[in-house]
Amino acid sequence: RIYDRSFRKTGEHSASVSVPALASREIIPDVPGNDFLEGSGFASLHLRDKGRLVSDNFYWLSQDGNFGFLASLPSVSLKVSAERELRDGHAVVRVRLKNSGSSPAFFIALRVERKEGKEILPSFWSDNYLSLLPGDSRDITWTAYDEISAQEPIQLKLEGWNVTAQAIMVD
């Protein structure tokens, strides 16, 4: 899907292709009259294998290198939930993000901190520094490398380019 800088959908392209492993293939040819993107805007690309989502990517694009339009993205407040569990002695936090707004939530950054505000490192995120389109949701998992007591208070912090910052305690 292609969106202009005001996040109005301007096009949608879909193609079924067969590509061998470790290969690439041009799907949308660059030919005169192709309205893939004029000026500045966004592209949301989804790769599926037999209907199963394999990869999704969100791009911000500008033909002239001017990305000033990102400063005018409307503010978005995400719905966030987080649940904590213990797996093999490691703290795991399952996070669900939902964008119920009408603008993309751009460049969302997540972190898990101890009560006093120090980030818990090293850790592993299944996804981070992501964008969510209007109506989209994403489930993300955070895993601590070191053991953390199940009683130790931890909090999830979320911020983004145009996203209202949030901090929630994780039980």
Image (cartoon, helix red, strand yellow):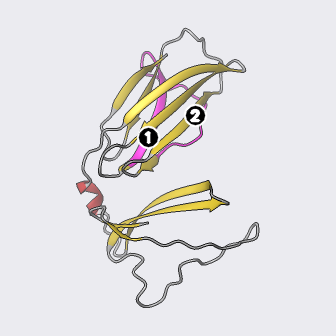
The N terminus sits in image quarter = bottom left
Residue at the extreme right: 21
**Circle 2: residue type:** Thr
Q: Which residue lies most toward the bottom here?
A: 32
Residue 124 sits above or below residue 25 on the image: above
Tell me residue 157's x, y (percent).
Answer: 41, 29
Q: Which residue is mark 2?
A: 141
Q: Secondary structure at mark 2?
A: strand
Distance of mark 1 from mark 2, alpha carbons? 13 Å
Residue 151 on the magenta span: no
Which quadrant would residue 43 be assigned to in this image?
Answer: bottom left
Whether residue 120 sits left or right of residue 48 in the image: it is left
Q: Quadrant of residue 91?
A: top right
Determine which of the numbered discs, if any, sits on residue 130 in the image: none
| Residue sitting at x 60%, y 11% | 149
| In the rendered image, the vertical position of residue 53 relative to residue 99, given as above or below | below
Instruction: Look at 43% across and 47% down and name the residue there.
Output: 136
Residue type at numbered disc 1: Ala
Front residue of this view, candidates 76 and 167: 76
Extreme residue in the top direction: 151
Give residue 102's position: percent from left, percent from top. Answer: 29, 51
The earlier-in-sequence mark between 1 and 2 is 1
Q: Is residue 115 magenta?
A: yes
In the displayed structure image, the side of residue 171 where residue 10 appears, left or right: left
Q: Total number of numbered labels?
A: 2
Query: What residue lies at 55% left-to-right and 43% top-to-bottom?
Result: 127
Which residue was labeled with disc 1? 109
Label 1 sits on a secondary structure element that is strand
Start-end of magenta stretch: 106-129
Q: Residue at x 51, y 58 (%)?
A: 57
Give coordinates of residue 61: x percent, y percent.
39, 67
Question: Are the residues at dot 1 and dot 2 in contact (C-beta closer than 8 Å)?
Answer: no
